[in-house]
Amino acid sequence: MSSKPSPPDIAILEYGSPTENQTESIRAWIQEGTTRKAAKLLGKDPGNIGRDAKLVRQRAEKAGWSPTFSASELVPTTEQVIGRSILTKDDEGNTVWLKTKAKKEEEQHAFKEFIKTLTEEIKPAKKIPAPKGKKNDELMSGIFIGDAHIGMYAYAPETKHSDFNTDIAAQGLRDAIDDLIARSPDAETGLLCDVGDFMHMNSSLYTTLKGTPLDCDTRYSRVLRIAGRVMKYAVTKMLIKFQKVIVVIAKGNHNEDPAVAVQEITSAHFENEPRVTVLDTDGYFHYIEWGKWLIGVNHGDKIKPAKLVNVMARDMAAAWGRTTHRMWATGHFHHQQVLELDGCTVYKFGALPPPDSWHAGAGFGGNGQMQMITFKKGGGRHSTMIYDLPQPSQEPDLVA
């Protein structure tokens, strides 16, 4: 007969970066002695209690903690333990080192479980009253968020541009959303399109997906929560203006994993709102057919514009034939560009933040703009609105 699992070590709360919900589960298990009693106390499923503890323990172990030994004090908060070396002897008595590393599949599974736990804590927003008055069903206003890089850090004296952090990024996005929505015509449909790299880092390792080190501000969990709140703010504001809202959150080279998390968080927020449609962030290509328009969304880091046109024609052959106007919305290159290709126009939307240390050193910088394109259902564009984020005026190091 199998024995009941023992309560976890309370030390995992210190090193495992638990959410409030996870902390509540673990403390209740320790207090009550069993997951069943803890679940009864909290009104939760016993399986959720055990899962919360497992996820927090996994993160604590990545920080260097274990029941018999803790390397946590030796590991900086910006790093995590990626492997383990064990000194042992083989069958012939030779001293050998065994080096281990977590399986990628296990890391992905743990991340998906983390997202699931995070979204379970979200209470769906109450339905927002639809705007009064007749809206023009022949118009759709699309707000395109270029690479937002929430979580990036920049220091103005170093970059000769402006300071940047998570709070500045969030406020800039809210200001841009407010301005563009206020200037939108009375379109029936609103499209909110994030073209990728909404968050600066892919994980708590503070790197891109491929491992490139980044200048990051604050903790990964806080950045993820703020990114979710900004998206909730934008959708809420659009619901007040438009009858219907479509949301696209694309993966970027900086945020392939958290893009999925932000999409799940947004879906959870508006689970009970029938006027909101949030597209799944599973793959790298997203398509919307609206009237005579076919709109594709892709970050643009892995494929050239001309190839994107071919991909759209291949993937959406029937929709391509039904439509007369087609476009791709991309980002990645941190500057604005419009390419008119055969049968399709590719828009590269500029990055929103100022340059960080690396980009400033290489002479790169974003244009700090957000655009809203209003489409006509019969084809063509009704209007284009631009919001310019505030730009600094730097003084020379010396005026002789």
Image (tube, rainbow, N blue to C red):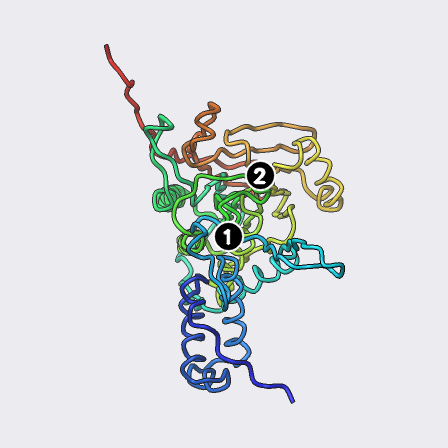
Residue 96 placement (x, y as % from top left) = 67, 54
Residue at the farthest top position = 400
Determine whether, in the image, residue 321 is placed left or right of residue 335.
right
Foreground: disc 2 or disc 1: 1
Q: Are marks 2 and 1 in contact (CB under 8 Å)?
A: no
Residue 209 in view in this figure: yes
Name the mark on residue 80. 1
Q: Amino acid at mark 2?
A: Ala
Label 2 neighbourhood size at 10 Å, few (<14), some (14-19), many (20+)?
A: many
- Vertical side of 259 occupied by 30: above or below: below
Residue 38 location, quadrant: bottom left
User: Which SS class for mark 1?
Assistant: loop
Q: Which mark is residue 329?
A: 2
Q: CA distance from mark 2 to mark 1?
A: 35 Å
Foreground residue among 94 and 370: 94
Residue found 41% across the figure and 51% down from its top: 219
Q: Position of residue 25 (x, y in %)?
A: 44, 75
> In the shown orientation, is residue 292 left or right of residue 266?
right
Which residue is located at x 28 percent, y 21 percent? Answer: 395
Where residue 216 appears, as percent x and y from the top left, is 43, 43
- In depth, the one of 371 and 131 nearer the eye is 371
- Circle count: 2
Q: Residue furthest front?
A: 93
> In terms of secondary structure, where does tag 2 sit?
strand
The C terminus lies in quadrant: top left
Q: Which mark is residue 396?
A: none
Q: Work out whether mark 2 precedes mark 1 in sequence or the reverse, and give the earlier one.
A: 1
Residue 241 is at least partly visible in this image:
no
Amino acid of disc 1: Gln
Q: Is residue 219 left or right of residue 288?
A: left
Image spot of residue 55 (x, y percent): 53, 66
